[in-house]
Amino acid sequence: MSGKLKNRYIFISASFPSKEQGVEYLQDFVPMLTMDAVSAISREIFQAGGKIVNGGHPTILPFMYSIGEEFKSKRKKDFPLISVYQTEYFRDKQTISSKKLSKNKIGEFIWIPESDNPPQEEKAKREDALAIMRNAMYEHKDIVAGIFIAGMKGIKDEFDLFQKSYPEKPFYVIGSC
């Protein structure tokens, strides 16, 4: 195993778009290609000694978790491999993969408090929680690059915030932002 990324973090933003996000995000979307990209990139990052920071989208986290499991014996005590930022708004929405990620020490959840005065409407409350999470992710130390896979509003928001937060860091777009 190479150590080119030893204890450095790559930010990955990826998800499977939904109809609720808008049909324009579904037009060229191929789920298998996104799954393959997330898996291959995660594998290469872990192989190079790196770690991942992300927001733990429930369609993507299972792939990262699965690849992380492959490295359990190779990386020994170099865990967690994945730092997942979430606001308390999402705590009761954790998937089985999310729970396994923490339990098996492949990843860690960094729980961010919700807004002191969240909006009342559910959709606005969710958007507020996502904005808080995104801002907290970009305070993570040791991020050396960003990778953005597929495309939808949240990926675009994270891409824009990455460029603003880390104007000197390289980024790679796979799909559309």
Image (cartoon, rainbow, N blue to C red):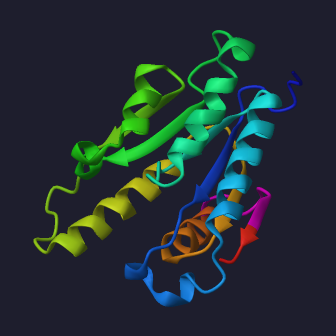
The stretch of residues the image draws in magenta is 165-173
Q: Residue drawn 27% across and 65% down?
A: 126
Q: Can you give x and y, in whole percent of width and height, for residue 16 in the image?
A: 53, 66
Q: Residue drawn 75% across and 67% down?
A: 174
Q: Can you give x and y, in whole percent of width and height, for residue 61 in the image?
A: 51, 45
Residue lying furthest left in this view? 120
Q: Locate the N terminus and report the quarter of the image it occupies.
A: top right
> Compared with residue 45, is residue 73 higher up or lower down, i.e. above or below?
above
Residue 27 makes an appearance in the image: yes
Does residue 17 appear to the left or right of 76 in the view shown? left
Residue 139 makes an appearance in the image: no
Q: Can you give x and y, in whole percent of width and height, for residue 43 in the image?
A: 75, 37
Q: Residue drawn 77% across and 46% down?
A: 40
| Camera-nearest residue between 173 and 134 | 173
| Camera-nearest residue between 77 and 119 | 77
Tell whether position 86 is magenta.
no
